[in-house]
Image: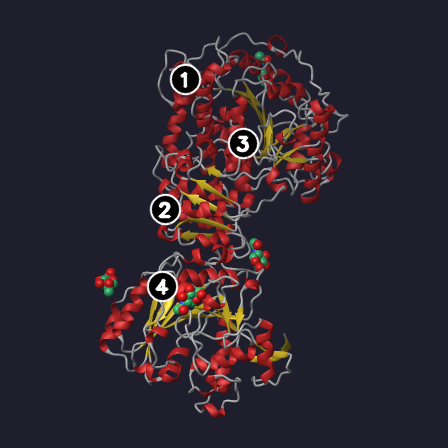
Amino acid sequence: MGLARNPNLRSGDYLEGMLNDFVGGKTKSKPPKSPPARLVTMLTCLQFAFAIYATFLLYYLSPAIDLRTKPDFSWATKFAQNWRNLIIPTHVVSRYQDSSNSLVQETPAVAHFTPREVCENEKIDFQQKKSDDAVMIKLKRELYDEVLQFQSKSFGTETLPELMKMKSKWDLKGPHPNIPKVTVILNHFKRKTLCSQLESLLHQTLPFHHVWVIAFGSPNELSLKRIVDSYNDSRISFISSTYDFKYYGRFQMALQTEADLVYVLDDDMIPGRKMLQILSHVAGTEKYKNSVLGSIGRILPFRQKDFTFPSYRKVRSKEAGLYLPDPAYDITVGRIVEVDFLSSSWFLSAELVRTLFIEQPLTFMTGEDLHLRYVDAISYYQLQKYRNAGSYVLPVDPKDKETWGDSEHRLAYVSETTVIFKDIVQVRDDQWWKAFSTGYVTQWAKLYPQKVDALFYAHSLSEVKALAPLLEKFRSTVGKKTYIAVSGGGFCPCEDAAVALGWPKGVCRERRFKIFDLGIGAASSGVSDSEVPVIQGVYSSLKGLMRIHNPSVVVAVDDVDLSVRKALRMAAEGAGNGTTLVLLPRNSVGKALWMADLRPTALPNWNKMQISINIITQNRVHSLTRLLNSLSNAYYLGDHVPITFNMDTKVDASTIKFINSFNWTHGPKTLRRRIIQGGLIRAVSESWYPSSDNDFGLLLEDDIEVSPFYYLWIKYALLAYHYDPQVSLPELSSISLYTPRLVEVVKERPKWNATEFFKRIHPNTPYLHQLPCSWGAVFFPKQWKEFYVYMNMRFTEDAKKNPVQIPKSRTNGWQASWKKFLIDMMYLRGYVSLYPNFPNQASFSTNHMEPGAHISAKDNVVQHDKSDFEVPLLKEDFRNFLPGGKLPPASKLPSLNLFNQAVSLKGLKAAGAKLKQDVLQCEVTETVMVDHDTGLPSQCAKF
Ligand SMILES: *[C@@H]1O[C@H](CO)[C@@H](O)[C@H](O)[C@H]1NC(C)=O
Ligand SMILES: *[C@@H]1O[C@H](CO)[C@@H](O)[C@H](O)[C@H]1NC(C)=O
Ligand SMILES: *[C@@H]1O[C@H](CO)[C@@H](O)[C@H](O)[C@H]1NC(C)=O
Ligand SMILES: *[C@@H]1O[C@H](CO)[C@@H](O)[C@H](O)[C@H]1NC(C)=O
């Protein structure tokens, strides 16, 4: 085993041997050719494995988390076995196995030493570096001020005296003192600082409860142990890495039954005498009780002008972030400051620690000092992610060294500036970037809230490929920002995803927002098939990424793994109104490219509308079959679309049979049948009534046929003109699927060619028209309710009794029909419909003009040349025809009056008001306003 410790090895070599065992499990007799690179990989693997483990555990431990799934620990047990192999050097185990299993080794009766005899002290011959680079000093100072200013506004930054004045649960002095039990954990490796630490701890103004000296794999194990023994203090225990499994249990017990607070110190920290008191006080305040406190911290890099994030060690760069305090640049911490992570010391409540170190299974967590030494940042990321626990560097009194957590800061500074491994900077950069790109909210992210249009999530490579067209469309649309997150690991390797998207593999390594590798695959593959870590990983990462980037929509394919779907939903629901989850069927992705042309204000409303299909039928089963086939073959983007059949009394057996056997896969199917013949006027108008303001009714007679793209047209138009809070088009009351070829309301019924008419604007611009369409249109809830009330007040069979006479309109002579009353209302109030306008009048619906009972209501269906009414159905993506490939802004839509003359929306209202024939007596400058809920007329209002 490579774990055999050789005192001549430097720590780096030793660690490498260890990692080698963990990662590969192979024994290499020869030293590898390029140790650093390999080491870096392995370190990263190890750290990452740990991060995943911590992520998972924390999720289930945290009471703040929505527990919708049951934890499954089977994988964890397997994982623990790996750790066990890693942690227990075989030769050491055999050394202890036979004697005792107790934690602290029974010391054989040997000569006892006093601390004075065994203490070693570190000679610090390192001079604290001071920068004389004026530019750097200025840059660092500016950044620090910017951070402080932001924090003082958002959260408040107290000075030390202010902190000490705050009310704390841990009151050491008052009449009813409440003194916390603090367990101190000292991590030791090679430094000779143990005696200084113990001396400081023994003379604290708040005495500690226990000190655990942990020496994991330390070459100085024996001398460290001798020192602990020499103090002969039952409160101070020594735990060597030659661990036995009960150790962990005891550690847990110490935390659970005794300690209130835990102070973890690396061997480069010698705390001032007042440290425990100050830390406990602050940790007992309401404001900081969920925080991790420390004395040294780091603000992670900021984004540079080129949109990349620099290395945390980049020189002469403002964006490299901050090391706090930084004596080199004279940066001291005078006010409590939130940092991205703490190094060298961590003070937190035992309860928070328990979220880090789970006790189940007991034999599990054995590598925490490895963890603290090399993976320090990661688990604190988890704390933030799950408990909203911030990390803070406490302020000091510069004149009172006893208030310093690092009374010998030079020690920590050496650790900070000395690179143990050549590639440690790279490792650490990878580490923080990994955390950041999987949802850790850094100070930069808090200072600079982001707003992206879409965040894609792909769990597998095939999903990447399926989503690629839409992702690319977003990316190529001016002003749109979008990123993709992939599960990573074995599920969907980032580099493969990049290749599938036609991007260089390097995008997975550069520190730039583009593709986020969540590394989820690594968590489960080979460890367990359990869905739990997957849900957990996706949920936590997406939640963080949404907090940082505020996407308007999160897009995934709708056949994504069920547990992933659950996780995406949970994350999106938690994100509030701003973010909507869009699940698209794979075959629809390429049909929804117009999504990228919607405004960010409209995008989050993607799922709001409900469009129901309402079919009016009786005895034309052949027609009905054709209609239903065309409906079944259309794209619905995964939306829920209910279908209702409204059958009049004379419905025949074959129609009923067919409807019964018809399978509708997009939503519920409802059948309604009349007892007394309604005729067209009731059959159509009563076929649908809105149940909410988001309920839109598509009314279809059975001899209509639709284009596969009809639903996309409706949805796109609704999002662009109705659901965008930045667009005001209250006159829009329906969306037509059909482009007419005649001017219906003029006596001679002249031919009408919209393409020709609008060619100066754009031959295929959609347009607004005062005419409602009865051959395939979606009606809006507000105006439909209004129409019900209007018709109720005005209905008369006798055309002459109708008080509304639209000048020069053939409709005045029409028999009573629902469309006639709708025309009247739209004319009086200046409402319009949106119409498509494609080459050759190709439309989203056509009417086959087949004879049937309803055709006998002949006044609005003329016995004319069929070719004047039947239009071709659009069979290709309509985007290509639209001006600029997208729907024009609402303000650019041309509008026509009932007679196909160009009139502004205002002009339409004026014409209607001029008649003064509405249900209320209004002035010529006013139209009738209606109650939104009931549709009842309420007042006149100026337009
Ligand atoms: C250690 O302390 C215990 C109790 O305080 C005492 O009885 C014992 O003599 C001490 N041992 C040594 C070697 O000083
Ligand atoms: C959601 O929207 C409503 C109404 O627009 C608003 O009152 C509410 O604060 C929003 N909630 C969130 C979490 O943004
Ligand atoms: C509808 O689905 C049922 C059950 O899946 C099937 O038996 C029936 O044949 C289907 N009907 C049609 C018309 O496809
Ligand atoms: C309509 O006008 C366009 C453009 O002027 C023309 O190309 C097309 O042939 C016309 N269609 C009909 C049916 O007249």
Could you give the CA–CA distance between mark 2 and mark 4, rounded to whole angstroms?
A: 31 Å
Could you give the CA–CA distance between mark 3 and mark 4, rounded to whole angstroms?
A: 51 Å
| Mark 4 secondary-structure assignment | loop
Q: Amino acid at mark 2?
A: Asp
Crowdedness near tag 3: few (<14), some (14–19) or many (≥20) residues, C-alpha within 10 Å: many
Dot 3 or dot 2: first in sequence order is 3
Q: Which residue is mark 3?
A: 432
Total marks drawn?
Answer: 4
Q: Residue 707 — which label?
A: 4
Do tag 3 and tag 1 residues touch (Cβ < 8 Å)? no
Could you give the CA–CA distance between mark 4 and mark 1, rounded to whole angstroms?
A: 71 Å
Crowdedness near tag 4: few (<14), some (14–19) or many (≥20) residues, C-alpha within 10 Å: many
Dot 2 or dot 4: first in sequence order is 2
Q: Is residue 590 left or right of residue 319?
A: left
Could you give the CA–CA distance between mark 3 and mark 2, rounded to whole angstroms?
A: 29 Å
Q: Residue 89 — which label?
A: 1
User: Residue 458 or 29: which is nearer the viewer?
Assistant: 458
Crowdedness near tag 2: few (<14), some (14–19) or many (≥20) residues, C-alpha within 10 Å: some
User: Where the N terminus falls, by quadrant?
Assistant: top left
Do tag 4 and tag 1 residues touch (Cβ < 8 Å)? no
Q: Amino acid at mark 3?
A: Trp
Q: Which residue is mark 2?
A: 561
- Mark 4 vs mark 1: give the one in front: 4
Crowdedness near tag 1: few (<14), some (14–19) or many (≥20) residues, C-alpha within 10 Å: many
Above or below: residue 56 compared with residue 802: above
Q: Amino acid at mark 1?
A: Pro
